Image (cartoon, rainbow, N blue to C red):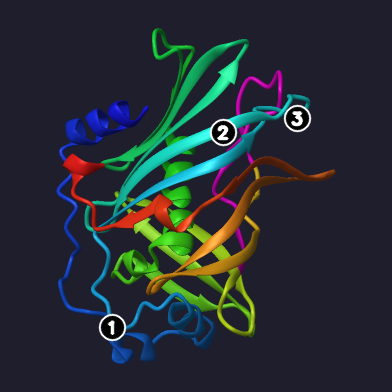
């Protein structure tokens, strides 16, 4: 999976350059709503240049459907920030003794989901507007949790939403997505909710636009960064949340400003 991810990133021709080399200053934060300033300071953004890329590995469990059993999850991904917003995510799941490789990508404004058992043949290749928006807002989620300086770009607008929350609106390749981020008094993110993803219930022909959430259980200090200790992904269905992924991240699992040839 590591080699496949590296090859796909190389094939995408990503440059992984931040839109400006200037470090983030208090003046940059001054024009933002108070919950946003609190969040960015908690994440230790001021004083550092904007991140050009982030590489993430996660470990946990995943279930592909409402009645499916949990399966061991191993994932790797590589994201770049504006003006070249991109996400290449690979995960491996065991099915009846066969490793199934799933790919979620957002490249040049296009989202795609590809599922290949043993990486030998294609079981599903999905794309279109729902995946364009869904992959872009998932990129936003990654940035909120792992590389918030990528969001300090003219393509992102920030709005206060009460004392302990803010809304993000991002435009990329004519796509517009939004999310609500909840923070505690220290500025630590506790939740992320967006209306811009689509869920396909078992047996459904087409996915349905469904609120998507990633609650965060806690944070740890990793050098001069803060990282979530554990996250989960869930669909907010009419009859209650459906958690389909749970993962942990260690300090050594995340690296920033990694060039594409080291993805």
For residue 32, above or below residue 157: below
Numbered disc in front, either 3 or 1: 1
Residue 179 is one of the magenta-drawn residues: no
Marks 1/2 in contact by CB < 8 Å: the verdict is: no
Position of 250 compared to 20: left or right?
A: right
SS for callout 2: strand
Which residue is drawn at the image coordinates 28% and 83% (left, top)?
Answer: 47
Identify the element where label 3 is drawn.
loop
Would you identify the image quadrant in which residue 190 lies?
Answer: bottom right
Whole-angstrom CA distance, mark 1 to mark 2, is: 35 Å
Q: Which residues are magenta?
A: 190-209
Q: Secondary structure at mark 1?
A: loop
Image quarter (top left, top right, bottom left or bottom right) of the N terminus: top left
- Residue occupied by mark 3: 66
Which label's residue is closer to the chain start, 3 or 2? 3
Residue extending furthest toward the top: 121
Residue shown at 48%/80% (left/top)?
Answer: 42
Q: Position of residue 252 (x, y in %)?
A: 41, 54
Left or right, 170 with respect to 240, comes to left
Dot placed on the residue nearer the N-terminal end, 3 or 1: 1
Q: Is disc 3 surrounded by few (<14), some (14 to 19) or many (20+) residues within 10 Å?
A: few
Residue at 49 percent across and 54 percent down: it is 250
The answer for how far apart the CA atoms under marks 3 and 2 are is 17 Å
> Which residue is label 2 attached to?
73
Q: Which is nearer the N-term, disc 1 or disc 2?
A: 1
Whether residue 194 is in magenta: the answer is yes
For label 1, the residue is 47
């Amino acid at each position: 999976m590591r080699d496949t991810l590296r090859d796909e990133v190389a094939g995408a021709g990503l440059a992984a350059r931040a839109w400006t080399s200037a470090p983030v200053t208090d003046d940059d934060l001054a024009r933002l709503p108070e919950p946003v300033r609190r969040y960015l300071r908690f994440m230790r953004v001021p004083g550092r240049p904007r991140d050009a890329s982030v590489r993430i590995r996660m470990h946990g469990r995943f279930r592909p459907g409402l009645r499916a059993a949990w399966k061991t999850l191993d994932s790797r991904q590589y994201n770049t920030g504006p003006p070249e917003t991109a996400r290449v995510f690979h995960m491996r799941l065991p099915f009846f003794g066969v490793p199934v490789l799933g790919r979620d990508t957002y490249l040049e404004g296009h989202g795609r989901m590809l599922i290949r058992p043993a990486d030998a043949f294609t079981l599903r290749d999905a794309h279109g507007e729902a995946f364009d928006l869904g992959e872009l807002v998932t990129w936003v989620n990654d940035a909120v949790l792992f590389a918030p300086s990528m969001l300090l770009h003219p393509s992102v607008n920030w709005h206060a939403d009460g004392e302990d929350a803010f809304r993000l609106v991002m435009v990329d390749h004519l796509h517009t997505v939004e999310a609500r981020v909840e923070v505690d008094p220290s500025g630590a993110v506790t939740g992320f909710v967006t209306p811009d993803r689509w869920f396909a219930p078992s047996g459904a022909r087409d996915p349905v636009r469904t609120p998507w959430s990633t609650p965060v259980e806690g944070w740890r200090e990793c050098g001069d960064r803060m990282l979530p200790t554990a996250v989960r992904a869930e669909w907010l269905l009419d009859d209650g949340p459906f958690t389909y992924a749970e993962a942990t991240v260690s300090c050594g699992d995340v690296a920033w400003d990694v060039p594409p040839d080291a993805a």
